[in-house]
Image (spheres, rainbow, N blue to C red):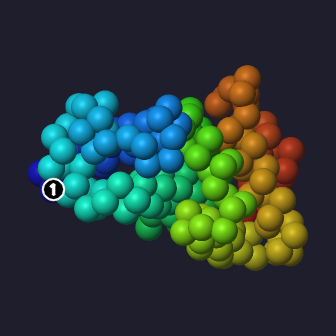
Amino acid sequence: MKELTQEKSTHLKHKMVTAIFDLEMQKGHLKWSVSQAARMARVSRSLVYYYLGKTKKEMLLNAMDFLTRNLYGLSEEKRDYQRKSLIKLLVECRSLYKANPGYAVFCQKWAEKPSVYKDLYDDIRDLYDEKLKSNFPHLSSVQRRSVRVLFYGIIAAPNFESNEIPTALGLLQLEKKGKG
């Protein structure tokens, strides 16, 4: 029963996060209301406050944290890469990315500007680099950065089918050098 509750909680949070990034893209930085986000996500305002925070800026930061951690696969159950789980993770991340076009626009806008959003993104990117280091200890920091960029390309590239991911990973020969 607890798993179902966690699954439903995650689903609700995904809906709210998607709504916030869509509104951020449509209306401009923090020019949306909590009521609009709740309506778009089809949840109550109190749920938006409960899951994402008390202010719109806090909600946006928490939405960014939630989505970025999910895209980087930083949950405990997704910390270790193995060939099958890496493919599954990239497929899941690709689906999540495609479902949140506002997130990509937001990150493009804020990832390079000095801000709390850039700081959060940098912190999560550093955690992801540590994940890559533990899973691919034979790679140099430049190689790990390259793998991060390639994974991002697999996740974000248009006209790239999920069934092509194993081929792309095979070309990188990560299945032979990674754990597992």
Choose top left, top right, bottom left or bottom right for residue 111: bottom right
Element on which disc 1 rests: helix
* Residue 14 place in picture, x, y as percent: 36, 43
Q: Is residue 123 left or right of residue 136?
A: left
Identify the residue at image location x=44%, y=67%.
Answer: 76
Q: Is residue 135 left or right of residue 60?
A: right
Q: How many marks?
A: 1
Identify the residue at image location x=44%, y=49%.
Answer: 30
Extreme front residue here? Answer: 31
Extreme top residue here? Answer: 159
* Residue type at numbered disc 1: Lys
How crowded pointer 1 is (Cα within 10 Å; few <14, some 14-19, many 20+) is rated as: few
Please state which of residues 119 and 10 is positioned toward the viewer in this rendering: 119
Q: Is residue 140 left or right of residue 100?
A: right
70 w.r.t. 95: above or below:
below
Identify the residue at image location x=44%, y=61%.
Answer: 61
158 w.r.t. 86: above or below:
above
* Residue 109 place in picture, x, y as percent: 66, 49
Extreme left residue here? Answer: 1
Please state which of residues 8 and 37 is positioned toward the viewer in this rendering: 37
* Residue 57 place in picture, x, y as percent: 40, 59
Q: Which residue is mark 1?
A: 2
Quarter of the picture containing the C terminus is bottom right
Please state which of residues 18 and 129 is positioned toward the viewer in this rendering: 18
Identify the residue at image location x=58%, y=57%.
Answer: 72
* Residue 24 place in picture, x, y as percent: 48, 41
Q: Is residue 18 left or right of residue 84?
A: left
Q: Is residue 137 visible?
A: yes
Q: Is residue 96 visible?
A: no
Please state which of residues 135 and 96 is positioned toward the viewer in this rendering: 96
112 w.r.t. 151: above or below:
below
